[in-house]
Amino acid sequence: MNVSQTLKKFLPKRKMTLRQKEAMYGRLFILPWLIGLIYFFIIPFINAIYYTLTKIKLGDNGLEFTFVGFENYLYAFTKDPNYIRTLTSSIVNMLYQVPVVVFFSMFVAYVLRDGFKGRTFARTVFFFPVIIASGVVITILKENVMGDVNTAASGSTTLFRVENLRAILVNSGVPIWLGQFIVNTISQLFDLTWRSGVQILLLMAALHNIPKSFYEAAVIEGATEWEKFWKITFPMISPTLLVAVIYSIIDYFTDYGNYVMRMVVTQLNNGRFEYSTTIAIVYFGIIMIIILIVNKVIGRRVVYLT
Amino acid sequence: MEARVRALKYKASEKRQTSTFTKAIIKKKIFNLLKNLFRYLFIIGMSYVLLYPILFLISNAFRDKVDLLDPSVVWIPKHFSIESFKLANEILGYANSMKNTLVILIPSVIIQTFVCMMVGYGFARFRFKEREILFGILLFTIIVPMQTIIVPLYVKFRHFDFFYIGRLIGIFTGKPLTINLLDTPWTFYILNAFGMGIRSSLYIFIFRQFFRNMPVELEEAAKIDGCGPFATFLRVMVPNATGAIITVMLFTIVWHWNDYYLSAMFFTDNLPLSVMLTILNERMNLLNNLVNANDIYLLRSSVLEAGCLMVILPLIVIYIIGQRYFTESIERTGIVG
């Protein structure tokens, strides 16, 4: 009450239509964000792009910039032995990890959907990764518990031993690429389950939002479970599936375990600010393009109710 | 005669019908049984995968030196010891780091939740021309992470000069007035106050979805009672948004607690817990005056695991207390696109 009254005093006394008034209040509500956007996002972003065109040196009065044009970009693409390699391997890994994560979360959300004994416990456990997976703990866990290749942690155990499985698959005549895919997926099962917490949440919320009457009508018509899934559930959750896919892509690329991400951080720690920013910007430019393509391709098949 | 035949036929068909009916029931029962069996198997298996690391941490952290070399100890240590915890506490500086964390965390969470709620409400309930395009930009900021703009941000906070006021003063005094905000929690407070804190865009998105689903009648009633938009927001909308607020608060707590990238960037002293944990491994040789060199080598991973456990323990407690609200409110508010 008081706030709006005092505001009224300071705002221009011009006669406004109801529409204009509404628009003004709307703008006032988002004003903090808008200031932040300009001051802490857009200006730094433009600065960052400028940095990539310079060479930064630590001088007497802080940082000194010398303009060098596209040298940093050229270095990343033609001279750096690691960048292109890590970049392509990141993208290729993403291409098969994201579908697996999304299918897995859809499956879990479907299983946890309706009431059964121990549902609370199951949900607590399944959302556990949301709490831990975003932090530094997961990196240490991965290195210590999973025995990551980079560290020789003493006394570490491997949760999923898959070397035997590979031999079995090859001997039983499964095509090598398919066997490789299965083995890769299983060896990363830990990673995949730990990555899908938020997606499970999203999809479960979507499943709960489907009106029960749809299913009742389908049962009366004599639909089987299989038909109910493909004719009702799947189209109804397709907008959320799109969100989940895009979230998974972003999550995969911005994960600290990602090698390009590690490169960005190490270069920054080595004091090569301009190069670190260059590879980061190229990297996120590529992610943007991938997300736009995915959005176009999947977006066409998404069904919106309203 | 004919009537008898018809009666017999009818009886037969009735029999057939009931038998197909019972068959269907049995079929359904078997299907449900299998479904439940499969579901529980799946849940138990997944729980193992998801809880394994925590159990592993607990089991290892409580081990004594003797048990670390004993291959017959698999899960339950034969000699319990909290030595690893003592050592981890020593390196982490637990009490002090915890204080540093909370100094950043508590105001940040409150400011961030409130600002995001306000912006989300603005996006959800008011119509203005540039709303859609601004919302598009908001979604874009979710995708671009801090890493691309961290260096300019660092420079900005090193010579902080709010809206170039310092530079304006500089015209008169000859030297621009800037403040070094690094190593103070103000870096986080300011970012949060302007909706640019850790994952703020996501929270704005969640609040917008939530407020869009609120009934318009609530607002109209408030308006008739003489509330302006801000009073409506504070008195009607905020009290009704408890579910969304709890969800977002839990997210902000978790993500601020786990953040080490920004903290490591902005802080050199007064490090919060998450950053201390990243350098725990390197600081292991600080233990030289507490235990002898051979033991350090042995205890290395055990201390690291104890440290991990100490850092995530408060989070787990908060989660277990809040998880009911958390999962339920997410289902109800539906953070759906």
Image (tube, coloured by chain):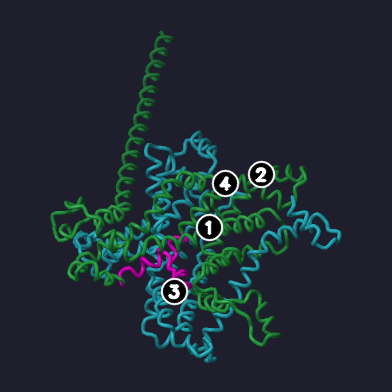
Alpha carbon separation for disc pair 1 and 2: 27 Å
B265 or A240: which is nearer to us? B265
Q: Main secondary structure of the magenta part?
A: helix
Are the residues flagged by discs 4 and 1 in contact, CB closer than 8 Å? no
Q: Amino acid at mark 3?
A: Thr
Q: Locate residue A284 relative to residue B317 in the image: left or right.
A: right
Q: Is residue A107 visible?
A: no
Front label number (1 vs 3): 3
Work out whether mark 1 precedes mark 3 in sequence or the reverse, and give the earlier one: 1
The verdict on a common chain for dots 3 and 2 is yes
Specify the subunit that label 4 lies on: B
Are the residues flagged by discs 4 and 3 in contact, CB closer than 8 Å? no
Residue receiving disc 3: B268
Residue receiving disc 2: B215
The verdict on a common chain for dots 1 and 3 is yes
Instruction: Indicate yes or no whether the magenta region holds residue B259.
Output: yes
Q: Amino acid at mark 4?
A: Thr
Residue segment shown in magenta:
B255-282
